[in-house]
Structure formats: structure tokens, C-alpha cells
Amino acid sequence: MIKATRRQWINCGIVTVLYLLFLVWVKSWLGLIVVPLIFDAYITKIVPWSFWKRSKNKAVRTVMSWVDAIVFALVAVYFVNTFFFQNYQIPSSSLEKSLLVGDFLFVSKMSYGPRVPNTPLSMPLAQHTLPVFNCKSYIEFPQWGYKRAPGFGKVKRNDIVVFNFPAGDTVAINYQQTDFYTLCYEVSHTTIPRVNMDSLTREQQKAAYDIYYAEGRKLVLENPTEFGKIVVRPVDRRENYVKRCVGIPGDMLKIVNGQVYVNNIPMKNPENLQFNYLVQTTGPNIPEELFQELGVSEADRNTAGLSENELYSMGFTSTNSQSKLNPIYDLPLTRKAYQTLLGNKKLVAKIKIKSEKDPTQLYPLNFYTKWDRNNYGPIWIPKKGATINLTAENLAIYERPIRNYEGNKLEVKGGKIYINGKQTNSYTFKMDYYWMMGDNRDNSADSRYWGFVPEDHVVGKPILVWLSLDKDKGWFSGKIRWNRLFKFVDNI
């Protein structure tokens, strides 16, 4: 054994102290098993870590030097990605015009404290599926429970937050962008006629929803060719979503005519809040230049999609020389864009907010509420340590947190509620929960559709837009949005 030099002892001491401080921060004493390996790498060198450097075969040295560099890079990326920050790309328009499709973000794990991974054995930069190989990017064993290291603070109202999709615990591989539970209800429509819920009691309504879900799940499971394999994902391997937090633990939230109220106080709306409007022109189509000025992407330039009778009844009466209705668009607009169109009398004949009821199932999926996306609640957001009385009216709202997120066995037998085999009419929550919504309110799949975000699903806070690409433009015609580069998210 070669005697260690003074420099090796110093390097070993520095690395060991830094590593021990890291273990104290993440409270993971299992990591102490790595300390002897650090000591051996610097001092004893019993394990021949760099055996390939002594090889006389040049090819071996070349190949192993690349392997060594790649392994080091993967470990470094895994470490940084898990505990400090990660890259995230905005995939949908749910937060426009605050964050745009094509924005690339640095997401800080330190803002709310990084989570110790549920699935520690995973490939960095692959959320759940390895590209090309199309297989899982993680090994399911071991799986660790939820633990979060101390961070700079907690999620606050109006924060933009990256989190794991709560309803992404179960996924049909061929329908990965669809909430599995909503998919089951929608599929059951094909075989079971819907009943008039107004004519049923609460117990009968619950029984009807249970039948719908069971039938839909059966159809999905029996048709793997269409729906694909059904997989269950750990929390940290679920899809990453980004939304704005509008409700924090303990808040009472409701939406009235599109306005969010928290604890009966109207919440200040984001500057770039959008709603969908029906816009009828005086005859010509809206020119490309105006669409650019309004910031409406090609994907959002939709027609009204309603019959002429429906449009006439809504007051859209501007017609051409053939007595046909002039073009009518369905567009997401900010207040500023709305005012721009409203003031263009030569082009715009009528503009009206789109106010139809949302036909999509809203949360909770198995509870008849008559709510819609613009008139929702009131709903109380669970808080860690808070106790709620459970009733037939609110059980559907809180059964998913109780059963799925906090791991309890919840049953209803003979009209009585049993949690872990014990009859009860109350429950004390073990975690904090949040209510997330998109700024593009009529084009956002958010908490109105799949409910609360548990604290163990929170990933981090977007800090910086480091790149922004416009998918509607070419590289030589403005694809890079230079004005958005290196902008702090809080300042957008």
C-alpha cells in the first residue's frame, strides 16, 4: 500500500466534511456507507479505481477514459438535478402569457427544499421513460418514503410551481396525456347511458359514479391494444406540471364568474390572465400581423365550433352578401389583447367572453356538484395537522388525499365511514396541500379537474427563462425570443 501524501489527506478531509454536511442537510444517514469508499479512493486505495490508467493497451485506456468521464458526468448531473436545480420546458399553453410554450426554465429545488428521491436508482434527465429503448428509466426497488431537506421557504400564493402530476399515479401508456381516472369515466360513456343525477339521492349518485368508473376501468384493462399497458408510477416519476399556486393549506377557495376568491377575498389576477372570447369580424379574416401583436399562437387560432342558430342566439348577427355569418374565432385573450380588438371597429363586429358550461368532468369526478370551470366551490384546502369532519357531502372531495396520497384504507359500509378498519367521522391530515391553476384559464387542465397537489409532489420553483423558442417561426424569422432570454420568472 502506497503511503498517502499530505495533499491526499487534506483532499480526503475536505471531501468527507462536505459529504457529511450534505448528509446532515438531507437527513439521510444511510449515506454513511459511502464514507469508507471516499477514504479508500483518497488514502488506502485498496480498490483499484484507476486500474485502466496502468494498462499498456492504448485502446483500453482510451475507452475507459471515456467511460470514466461519462460515469462522472452522469453522477454529477444526477446529483445536481436531484438536489439543486433542473431544466424544464413549457409544453402547453396553460400559463400563457406569463410563461410561453417553448420557454426553457431553470427550476430551483432549493426554493422549497429538495426531496430525497422516492426511486433513487434512476437515469438522470429521463423522467420515467428512456428514449429509444422505450422502457422505464428507473428501478422500482428500493423505494423510499417522502422526506424533504430544508429549503429557502414554502410555497406561497401566486408562486409558479413545478410539481408531479397528482393524477399521474396510474397511466394508460397509449393515453399518457390523459388523466387515467377521467379516461375511465369517459370510456364508460360508450356502454352505459348516463342518468339524470338531479333525480337521485346522494347515495344513488355515488353508486352510479362507482358503476361508471368500474365499467370504464374494465374496458381499459380489457383493451390493451387500444389503451396500452397500465402502469403505476412512484410520486417522483410522474409527469412534471407547472401551474400557479392560487390556494395554500387552510384556505377556503371558490371561483365566481372566473374570479378566484380566497377566504372570501377576491384574489389579485395575474397581469397576463387569459380567458377565451368569441370574436366576429366585419368580414375579413384576422390578419397574421394582428395575431402576432395579440400573441395568439397558431395552435390557439380556433373557429367558434357552434351552430349558426347558437351563434345567432348569442348576438352574432354580422353577415356577408350571401347572408352567411362573418368569420367567428374562439381565441384566448389577455385584458390588453381584448381591449386592442375591441377598439378595432373596422375589423371587429362583436366580441364576447365564452361563457358556456364546461362539459368536461371536474374534480371530484365521483361527486355531482353542478360546478363548472368558472363557477367552482367553495372548497377547503387541507392543511397538515388540521382535522375535518367527514360527511356524505365532502367525502368525495377528500377521499383521494386520505386514500391515495396519505396511504389509508378508506371504506364506506352501511352509510358509515371506516378508515383503516375503524369507524370515524373525522380525519387529521398528515400533509399540506395546494390548489394550482393556469393563467390561461379556459385552456388549462389544473386543480379544477384533478384536485389538490400534496406537498410531497412539489418539485421546485421556476427561477429563470434561459431560452425561449417560438414553434410557429423559423430560425431566421424570429424563432428565438431574444426579449425573454435570462428573464427572472418573478419579473414576467
Image: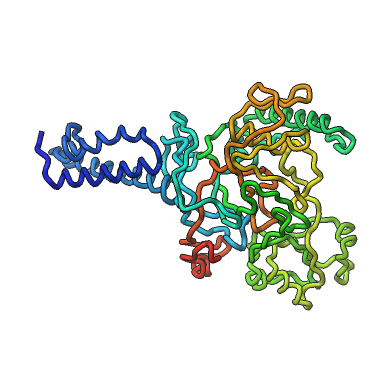
Q: State left or right for residue 147 relative to residue 447.
A: left
Question: Which quadrant would the N terminus be assigned to in this image?
Answer: top left
- Picture quadrant of residue 264: bottom right
**Residue at position x 78%, y 25% from top?**
415
Tell me residue 250's x, y (percent).
65, 46
Whether residue 177 is visible here, answered yes or no, is: no
Q: State left or right for residue 311 relative to residue 102.
A: right
Q: State left or right for residue 290 relative to residue 116.
A: right
Tell me residue 105's x, y (percent).
49, 57
- Picture quadrant of residue 78: top left
Whether residue 280 is visible here, answered yes or no, is: yes
**Residue at position x 85%, y 37% from top?**
197
Tell me residue 254's x, y (percent).
73, 51
Which is nearer the eye, 314 or 375?
A: 375
Look at the picture and state if 479 lies above or below 385. below
**Residue at position x 69%, y 70% from top?**
337
Question: Which quadrant would the C terminus be assigned to in this image?
Answer: bottom right
Q: State left or right for residue 382 relative to residue 126.
A: right
